Image (spheres, rainbow, N blue to C red):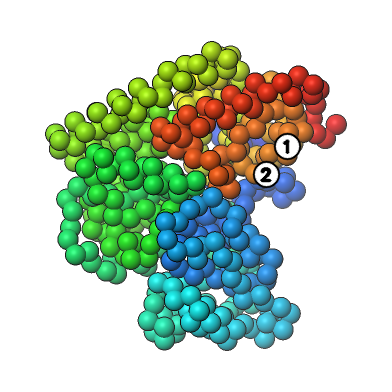
Amino acid sequence: MPAIDILKARQTQVYEKGRDHFTIECNKKSLSGAVSQRACVFCGSRVVLYPVADAVHLVHGPIGCAAYTWDIRGSLSSGPELHRLSFSTDLNEHDIIHGAEQKLERSIRELAAKYKPNAAFVYATCIVGIIGDDVDAVCRKMTKELDIPVIPVHSEGFKGTKRDGYKAACEALFKLVGTAEPEAIEPLSINIMGEFNLAGEAWMIRKYYEKMGINVVSVFTGDGRVNDIKKSHRASLNVVQCSGSMLGLAKMMKEKYGTPFIRVSFFGIEDTSNALYEVAKFFKNDKVYEKTQALVKREVGGIYPKLLEYRKELQGKKAAVYVGGAFKAFSLIQALRVIGIEVVLAGSQTGTPEDYDTLKRLCNEGTIIVDDSNPVELSRFSLEKQADLFIGGVKERPMAMKLGIGFVDHNHERKIALAGYEGMINFAREVHATVTSPVWSFYRKKAWYE
C-alpha cells in the first residue's frame, strides 16, 4: 500500500479489500512505540467483571491502576452499586519491597465488614506479578474466614493483551458458576453473555426475551448478581453477544455442564431480529416462535419509517469504524447500510482470524481493514477515504474532532442506549445529528499531526 505510510512491522495488520492479497495478522502483542489504542490485561478483566453490582472489586496494586475503574462505565444497576466504587490496596515502596499480602487481607476484611458484599474480586496488577504476592492463597484464606467467594483475577497487565484480560475474567466467573442450585429449572431459559447494561441495554434485551416467553437466568455481567451467576449452569442456552469477551466462558460451560451456546448481536435491526429468532428456533416451541414474529413485526414497523427519513439525508455518506470487538463492527456495518452509509475503514482491537474473514466479506471493495491500529493510521486512512463519520471509543474522539469528522461514541463510557430496536433509533439520530451538523462546513479537514 504505497499510498499509505505505515510502520513496516505493522504492514501485515493492515488490509485493503480488492488490493492486498495477504491474510491479515491479529492476536499478537502491540508493536512497541506504535501508540496502540488497545488496553492492557487488567483493563480487559475489569470490562467484563465490573458490572457485577453486588460484589466488591478490589485492585491489588498502586493507586494509579484504580483510576482505571471508578465510575468510568455506563453500566447501570437496578439495585446495589458497589461496581461504581473504586477500591485499591494502594501499594507503596515499602509494600513492593517487603510484600503486601497482609495489607491485602486487611483490605478485604475492611471492605467485607463495611459493604457486606456477596463476593469479592481481587485484581492482580503488574507490580503484584513482579513481587510475587500469593493472591490465590490470600483469597482462599479470606473465603473461609468471611464465608463469601473471594476470587483472584490474574490480570497482570504485562501478561498479554486486552483479550487475555477477558480470559482472566471468564476464569474468575467460572469459579462462581454451578456453586448454587435454583429452586426450579425453567425449560425455556437462557443466559445473556457479553452484555454489560450500558445505558440500560440489558434491561431492554431481557424484556424482548421475556415477551417471547423466555426466562433469563443471568446476564453476564450487566446488572449482574452473584447468586444469579452461581445458578446460571441450569439455563438451557447461552446467548453470547460480545464473543471476544465471553466466548471463553460459554465454551467452559459447554464442556462442564453441556450448555449449548449461540453467537448473536443486538446492534442494528437485522442483527437484533436474528438474535431473537435464533433463540426461538433453538427451543422449537410454536408459541414462542409466534410471539417472536409478532414482537419483531411490531418493533421493526415502529422504527423503520423514521430510519428511512434519516436515510434520505445520509445516503452516500462514508464512515470509519474502529471498536474493541470485531463482532460489534459487523453489526455497525449492517446498521449503517440501513441508513445509507458506506463503511470505508473497519477495525478492531481484539479480532480473531475468523472475525477478519467475516469482516472482509461484509466490507465493500476498497475498504481498509485494520487490527490493533493507532491514531496516525486511523487519521490518515479516514482522510484518504474521505470519511464523514468516525465510530469508536473515548480515545478516538479527540482524533476525529481534530480531523473535522463527526464522531459517535460506541464504547463503554457512553450514556445512550444503542442496542436493540430503541437503540437503533438512538444510533441513527446521533449519526444524523453529527454528520449533518453545519459546523463541519467551517472546518478545513487536515491531519492532526500537520
Which amino acid does the dot numbered 1 rest on? Answer: Met
| Residue 54 against residue 5 in the figure, above or below | below
Residue 439 at x, y percent in the picture: 74, 24
Q: Nearer the viewer, residue 252 or 145?
A: 145
Which quadrant is home to the N terminus? top right
**Where is mark 1, residue-wise?**
399
Q: In front: 144, or 370?
A: 144
State the residue at coordinates (64%, 23%). Answer: 435
Can you give x and y, in whole percent of width and height, for residue 165 in the image? 52, 57
Q: CA distance from mark 2 to mark 1?
A: 8 Å
In-image side of 195 versus 16 (left or right):
left
Quadrant that contains the C terminus: top right
In the image, what residue occupies the spot 49% across and 40% down?
417
Q: Is residue 357 above or below residue 206?
A: above
Q: Amino acid at mark 2?
A: Lys
Label 1 packing within 10 angstroms: few (<14), some (14-19), many (20+): many
Q: Does dot 1 land on a helix, a strand or a loop?
A: helix
* Vertical placement of residue 369 versus 70, above or below: above
Which residue has dot 2 on it? 395
Q: Is residue 345 visible?
A: no
Residue depicted at 41% across the width and 24% down the height: 303
User: Regarding mark 2 in the picture, which secondary structure is present there?
Assistant: loop
Seen from this angle, which residue lies furthest right?
450
Q: Is residue 309 left or right of residue 392?
A: left
The residue closer to the viewer here, 35 or 150, is: 150
Q: Position of residue 232 (x, y in %)?
A: 29, 59
Q: Nearer the viewer, residue 407 or 259?
A: 407
Rendered position, 406 above or below 145:
above
Give percent across and percent down for residue 103. Answer: 60, 84
Other residues around mark 2 within 10 Å, as few (<14) / some (14–19) / many (≥20): few
Tell me whether the residue at label 2 lies in contact with that at label 1, contact meaning CB atoms closer than 8 angstroms: yes
* Residue sitting at x 19%, y 41%: 283
